[in-house]
Image: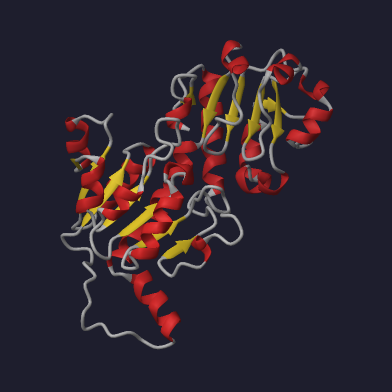
Amino acid sequence: MIKGLYVMNRGWFDKVYPQEVRKEIEKSAMIDVPLQTKESITENLSILRDAEVMFSGWGAPKLDERFLEAAPHLKALFYAAGSVKGVVTDACWERNIMVSSAYAANSIPVAEYTLSQILFSLKHGWHYSMAIKRKEKFVDKSSDCAPGGYGSTVGLISLGMVGRKVCELLKNYDIHVIAYDPYVSKEKAAELGVELCSLDEAFERSDIVSLHAPWLKETEGMITAAHFERMKPYATFINTARGAIVREPEMIRVLQRRTDLMAILDVTYPEPPKPGSPLYTLSNVILTPHIAGSGVNEAQRMGAYMLDEFKRYLKGEPLNWQITKGNVATLA
């Protein structure tokens, strides 16, 4: 039986790896050391001496040279969370450590959150809700311009894992989907039922614009004031990706002037916004504290994905969700 370890945030451990999942893992992995955190494992690296596999998640340690020197037999990391960019290093790839992430499992609730906000925003739900609170009475609907779900246009920025799941969910509605992603072919777009367009067009033509691009050097600050200026009257912008992709000071200036627009921000930069940020007080900004990803029950899906990957690893089968040096930036 191979030796294994659990190393992650204590508060999430039982949620991500519930007892029934751990029971299945431990049928094939001998785990005779209690759950470790990145702090406790750093203080006692000798625990790593015999470990071949490590099961982790939020709060994972960084697999740098010092860590890997103490883990000469480590062959695989099963990471029951999303991005591994803060965990893996060049030393990890040089050692040919097999890395699998539950980014695909985590993309499901993000897509579901996005769908909920798209449908609510097409009814101008947040416009009405905020106005009613502000005026302390129901507002006049006689000039209602909410497009609703029939024949409306939703623009997606990036057709990565989350963007594609949003496309699949939107197929159940009478909504026209357009998307900006320079790396997606016309054939793939047709398969997804999406019309490809430019970034400017996505903002100009859409009733809802939803951002799903990865945070890369190339995408940092990609969304500018000019894009928000192009938005249709009473359009909505949703960001469940990363705040740094948006030039937030520019966005704020446009939102302060164009009070018809609505911004639903599950992510910001910095996160949370600095004290005194207008994002806290603007009536056309909805802030949620990075909740689109996996919640308590949804976190179990990530552990289940990693259990499945572990079983594939034991059989010598290709992993479904393997992360490599080549795809680490875009996949997770």
Taking depth in this image into account, of 18 and 209 the one nearest to the observer is 209
Residue that sits furthest to the bottom in the current view: 137
User: Image quadrant of residue 232?
Assistant: bottom left
Position in image of residue 294 (x %, y %): 52, 49
Please say which color scheme the image uses: secondary structure
Position in image of residue 138 (x %, y %): 36, 86
Q: Is residue 332 left or right of residue 237?
A: right
Position in image of residue 227 (x %, y %): 30, 49
The answer to whether any part of residue 22 appears in the image is yes
User: Image quadrant of residue 221?
Assistant: top left
Position in image of residue 331 (x %, y %): 43, 31
Q: Does residue 115 sit above or below 56 in this rendering? A: below
Q: Does residue 77 sit above or below 306 in this rendering? A: above
Q: Is residue 292 left or right of residue 65?
A: left
The answer to whether any part of residue 171 appears in the image is no
Taking depth in this image into account, of 262 and 51 the one nearest to the observer is 262
Q: Does residue 16 sit above or below 238 in this rendering? A: above
Rendered residue at 61%/40% (across/down): 21
Rendered residue at 47%/46% (across/down): 243
